[in-house]
Amino acid sequence: MKYALIGCGRISPNHIAAAQANELDFVAMCDIDESCMEDKALKFKLGNELKRYTDYIQLLETEKPDLVAICTESGKHAAIALDCIKRGVNCIIEKPIALSIKDADDIIKAAVKEHVKVCACHQNRFNRSVQIIREAIDMNRFGRLFYGTAHIRWCRDHEYYDRAAWRGTWEQDGGALMNQCIHNIDLLRWMMGSDIVEVVGMTDQLNHPYIQAEDLGIALIKFKNGSYGIVEGTTDVYPKNLEETLYIFGEKGTVKAGGQSVNVIEEWNFSDMLDDPATIKERFHENPPSVYGFGHKPLYADVIHAIKQDRQPYVNAVEGKKALELVLGIYKSAATGMPVKFPLEECATTDFIGRFGN
């Protein structure tokens, strides 16, 4: 299966490693900054035979890959994905899948029309800790779900934003919720029932006056099944990343996943006593080297199987839209000071340009 990478920035090493681990035929990479490509080629010993492009359209038309990973700045995800899909190329799109409801819908429709597989890269769904929690949800071990919470308490300093001018902008990124917190927001929505009635949100810019978007977001979510969600996301923690945690509370169970990227079971209590909490904590404990975790390799494996078996990926474009929609709903509620009803019909990060006066 011929594979190409578009965008060779901060997250690209995880994609390259996953592609190599799954023995894809890595034929080409693309970036407008040639030094980024050379850096990754050197790091992964890719050799001169791997083609380099600064124009992704030229890459697509010359190499005709079967699968492409899109790892550019967020604001370019949708346009590149649509160009790939129109050429019949399957896609793994880094989070978020797009920055507007319209663009996400266009990706979903185009994928169906062209019979192309599209995966939203929410790799934390493949964490061993997350998988065992999802299994408990599917087995109804929690009974009635009461509420869940997602806490993302991280640090992003001036240097982080200086390294890439698009970060923290409304046109190309969004703030803490859209960039850093969307993985855990995705997990919360997925676990708690997916369908949302309404959202109440507050956002602020407390410590990053040099960006356009928020560095703190807080939200209350009402799900259609009667459960609730709480989101707390920030990049203001001093002096380094503190934690990313997911709690699920039900009438018959309580679970907490924590660690760098919800990869450690810290609480595991169920009334059915089907398993030993200490054993679960030991078996489903991972210690990844970074907040990106170990999920890219199994995500890639799933996409490859989805293409071969002609089925939807585990995290398809519709799921990617759901995570995007929740963040945009929080943004809209925070900007208007009003609860926001779901589904969202029209909304984009660019709607909030000037929100914090810059």
Image (tube, rainbow, N blue to C red):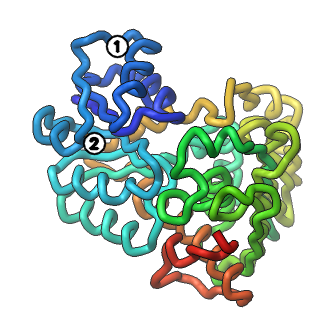
The image quadrant that residue 174 belongs to is bottom right
Place of residue 118 in the rendered image (x, y in percent of width and height, measured from the top left): 34, 52
Place of residue 124 in the rendered image (x, y in percent of width and height, measured from the top left): 61, 43
Tell me: 78 left or right of 64. Answer: right
The image quadrant that residue 1 belongs to is top left
Q: Secondary structure at mark 2?
A: helix
- Name the residue that disc number 1 marks: 46
At horizontal 77% and vertical 62% (from top left) the residue drawn is: 216
Tell me: 6 left or right of 219. Answer: left
What label does residue 226 carry, if any? none
Res. 330 in view: no
Q: Residues within 10 Å of mark 1 (few under 14, many from 20)?
A: some
20 to 273, vertically: above or below: above
Residue type pointed to by label 1: Leu
Q: Nearer the viewer, residue 77 or 356?
A: 356
Q: Secondary structure at mark 1?
A: loop
Which quarter of the rendered picture does the C terminus lie within? bottom right
Q: Residues within 10 Å of mark 2 (few under 14, many from 20)?
A: some
Q: Nearer the viewer, residue 318 or 208?
A: 208
Tell me how far mark 2 sits from mark 1, CA to CA: 25 Å
112 to 44, vertically: above or below: below
Place of residue 280 in the rendered image (x, y in percent of width and height, measured from the top left): 79, 34
The image quadrant that residue 105 belongs to is bottom left
At horizontal 68% and vertical 30% (from top left) the residue drawn is: 290
At horizontal 44% and vertical 61% (from top left) the residue drawn is: 98
The reply to whether dot 2 and dot 1 touch (C-beta < 8 Å) is no
Residue type pointed to by label 2: Ile
- Name the residue that disc number 2 marks: 307
Res. 217 in view: yes
At horizontal 80% and vertical 39% (from top left) the residue drawn is: 241
Q: Mark 2 or 1, which is nearer the eye?
A: 1
Tell me: 135 left or right of 148. Answer: left
